[in-house]
Amino acid sequence: MLRRWLRRCTFLRVAKTRAGRPPHTNMDWNSRRITAILENALVEDRATRDATSYACIDANQRASATIVSKQDCILAGIGCVARILDVYAALDGAVTAHYEVTTHPEIFDGVRLHKGQSVAVIRHNARVILSCERVILNFLQRMSGIASLTRKFVEAVSGTKARILDTRKTAPGLRVIDKNAVRCGGGQNHRLDLSDGVLIKNNHIALAGGIVSALERAVQNRRGSQIIEVEVRSVDELKLALAHGGEAILLDNMSVEDVRRAVELCSQPDLQKDGRRIPVECSGGIRLENVRAYAETGVDFISVGLLTHSPQAADMSMRVVPT
């Protein structure tokens, strides 16, 4: 019943699973949005004006480049490799050589890599490989770092019903990239942007004149069937939200015991609609050390900002040799 209710929530993009693979991680690397991100990264690095490669490498030199993981990690972003080469060629306008990117069939987004494992092999013009090297690695390392951290949180709450969510605390301009990496790690996406659902937070409450006023306005002004989620910081605020139209609850910076009590309050039969109880999410101060304790309170979702605002890049390198 709860899952059917969640399908109505535009701000909770619940990942689906496929047999034998991690949660759905497909991303359209050919989309305009992603192409613009990759193009901006290449332009930022002035990749088509690589002075060193131009000065040192023959224009017709071919090379083979092997991307290697230098640590155990979760892979994310493998699709960027070939696409960056395509975007580079479009920007440069003079690339005539054809490239080949090969990977093992067992290498895909969401797979666990081991230290020293090959991720992909690129065969192409040597200048192009060197000019794209850093941009390719930047995306792979950031995305794999996010996916690896996410997987740790997902594994930490294994066996509970809690699902790990990301937030909008992403690198400016890279949100779609960061959120895809979360899915590669087994997490799920919360709101993609501000249009993606009604989430009443502390500043909305302060400006609207309190929880009651904010909820009344939200119920009146929401678009279509958007679910109204409201952030509360205490059990007293929770009771107000439940009494005045809150349809999903975000518990902000509350202790484990207060979260447990809040879950019990939201599970009361008189608050259920058509047999469905109000979903409860908690956030604020969530770390690997305490996420299990929060998950065991019975909360439905745990949102973790540090997945995307403080990831440590995975250690990868590119080994290039002449062919």
Image (cartoon, helix red, strand yellow):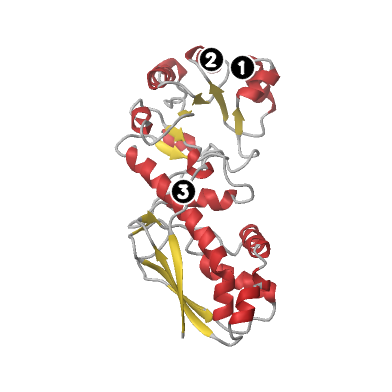
Image quadrant where one finds the N terminus: top left
Does residue 137 appear in this view?
yes
The residue lying toward the viewer, choosing from 256 and 69, is 69
Q: Amino acid at mark 3?
A: Gln
Residue 269: x, y in percent? 40, 17
Note whether 323 is above or below 21 in the view shown: below
Q: Secondary structure at mark 1?
A: helix
The residue to which callout 2 is attached is: 237
- Res 312 label: 3
At x 49%, y 81%, the residue is: 63
User: Quick check: marks 3 and 2 in contact, CB under 8 Å?
Assistant: no
Image check: 47 left or right of 64? right
- SS type, badge 3: loop
Q: Which mark is residue 88?
A: none
Query: In the image, what residue type sits under mark 1?
Result: Ile
The tag earlier along the polypeptide, 1 or 3, is 1
Q: Earlier in the sequence, mark 1 or mark 2?
A: 1
Q: The residue under label 2 is which amino acid type?
A: Glu
Label 2, residues with CA under 10 Å away: few <14, some 14-19, many ≥20: some
